[in-house]
Every structure is written in C-alpha cells, then in structure tokens.
Amino acid sequence: MRRDIFQAIADPSRRAIIALIALQAMTPNALAAHFDTTRQAVSKHLRILTECELIKPEQRGREIYYQLEINKMKEIDKWLEQFRKIWEKRFDQLDTLLTTLKKPKK
Amino acid sequence: MRRDIFQAIADPSRRAIIALIALQAMTPNALAAHFDTTRQAVSKHLRILTECELIKPEQRGREIYYQLEINKMKEIDKWLEQFRKIWEKRFDQLDTLLTTLKKPKK
DNA sequence: TATATTTGCAACCGAACGGTTTCTTAAATT
DNA sequence: AATTTAAGAAACCGTTCGGTTGCAAATATA
C-alpha cells in the first residue's frame, strides 16, 4: 500500500479536507457536512492523511479534532524546488530577451 | 477518468520521468532505459502526462521527444500558495517569540 | 524492396482506490 | 441506567491503476 504525501493530495476530496483543516481544526462530522458523502468516507480520507502525517488527531472528549501538520506540506514545496529553478531561469532568459529587444539598435 | 496534475504526480515513476525530462527532452525508449519496466509502461505514463499537458511530444523522424511544460508545474506551486501563507505566518510567530525571549528581562 | 527500429494502441490481470452499509466502542446526555 | 451521539473498523462492491503481452503503423536502414 503506497502512502506518501503525493498520493495523499491526488484526491480532490482530500485536498478540500486539507484546505478546510488548514483554516481550523475540525471533527470528522463537521467535515462531512461540507461534502456530499458519508462520514465514513471522510473518515477513510482522514485515516490516509493521518498515516502520512499530513494531519494530526487530537481527542477532546468524544470528539476528535484533526489539525493540519503544515510542516509536512513543505515537502511538496521542497520537491517543486528543482522545477522552480528551471522556470525562474526561463523567466530570466525571457527577461534578458525583452531587455535586449528594448535596447536601441546599434 | 480523472486526469489532473495532482493525479499525474501521484505516481513515483511519473515523478521520476518528469525529473528526467526537466533536464532535457527524451524519447520513450531512452526513458525506459532508466527504469526497471517495459517501454509500454513508460509509454502509458507519458500518455497520462501528455493528457494533462504536463509534457509535450515533438516528433523528429520516427522518434518522439517529450519535453516538460514547465508552466504547468506552476499550478502546483499556485495551490501551495494558500499553505505557504500559513507556514510563513507560523514562522513569523516563532521568530517573534524568539526575539521576545532574547530581550533582557525588565 | 525487405528488414529492423521506434512507437502507440488494445486486451488482459491483480491490486489498490473510493465509496457504501453494518457493527462496535466510548463518551455525553437524559 | 438507558439513550443518544461521535467515531473507527470490517466487509463488500464497482472502478481505476499500473503493469504485462501482443499487435499494427510508420520511419529508417540494408
């Protein structure tokens, strides 16, 4: 069973859950109210997100508040880094080109 | 059939393909040589990546060079933006705390 | 022209995915 | 103590995924 952060964010429902939890910790029931699905389905998503440590459960009485582990999100950012270098380079090249074009002709 | 960039990067083989192509455009055969799998499997990944416009095929004789559409990668960066705001805020708070601790006691 | 090479496409297969329904456990409320 | 509420666990179901094998099409080479 593959279980990493990239697989975790592949599902649109899970991305929506992450976005909601990012604003404030929420219970499975509260989350389910935002979706057109059963609480159990949400629970399954929460389990997956918990397993790859993207969210953390916090028991409060009989309720469980799930909160985002924002640091884990940085792993995606870290992976993107290698490509950011490339698109920044391309932007610089474009910038150079534009600057060159602007220069008065010899 | 769901086909978006998040699903595209969910698979580790596809992430590896993206990373290779980022450096230089490559053919399916050349790519397959880097993996312990058949060319057809790589071709399937390339198809998925092409469908969500993360890569672009360029025919050259009987070979097809696939090259990365770096701009598409920015979509991930864009999605991350909402969370980057949060982790930068948390960092600022930590920074403020540390600065406060450093201040001499009254 | 015959042959080899590069590639895509279709059919198939087992495993994983995303969902539902049903059941159990535990805490809160009456 | 009985009932309600919140949540997880297990079993099941149809679909998708990632891979394979086999085949057809098109280009290059002999």
Image (cartoon, coloured by chain):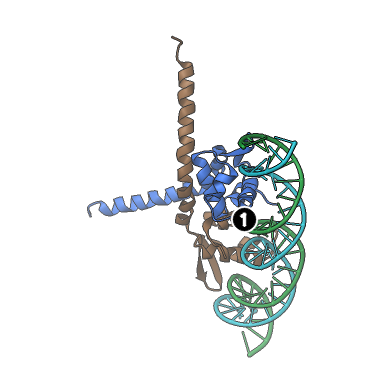
Chain colours: A brown, B blue, C cyan, D green
Whether residue B81 is visible to the viewer of this picture, yes or no, is no
Secondary structure category for the residue under label 1: loop
Instruction: Say what amino acid the circle numbered 1 marks.
Output: Asp
D21, above or below B74, in the image: below
Q: Where is residue A90 shown, x and y percent of the image?
A: 48, 32
Residue in the foreground of this view, choosing between A9 and B99:
A9
The residue that appears at 52% across and 50% down in the rendered structure is B34
Q: How many marks?
A: 1
Depth order, front residue of B34/A26: B34
Residue B2 appearing in the image: yes
Left or right: A35 as drawn, with respect to B103: right
Location of the N terminus of chain A (image quadrant): bottom right
Q: Position of residue D8 (x, y in %)?
A: 58, 73
Crowd around label 1: few <14 · some 14–19 · many ≥20 (10 Å): some
Q: At x 48% / y 23%, what residue is drawn?
A: A97
Q: Is residue D18 above or below residue B43?
A: below
Residue B28: x and y in percent read: 59, 45
The C terminus of chain A, quarter of image: top left
Q: Which residue is mark 1?
A: A11
Which sits in the foreground, C25 or A2?
A2
**Could you say where residue A5 lies in the image, as x and y percent from the top left?**
52, 57
Q: Chain of mark 1?
A: A
Report the residue that reaches farthest toward the top: A106
Residue A54 drawn above or below residue A93: below
Which image quarter: residue D30? top right
Q: Residue at x 59, y 41 (%)?
A: B55
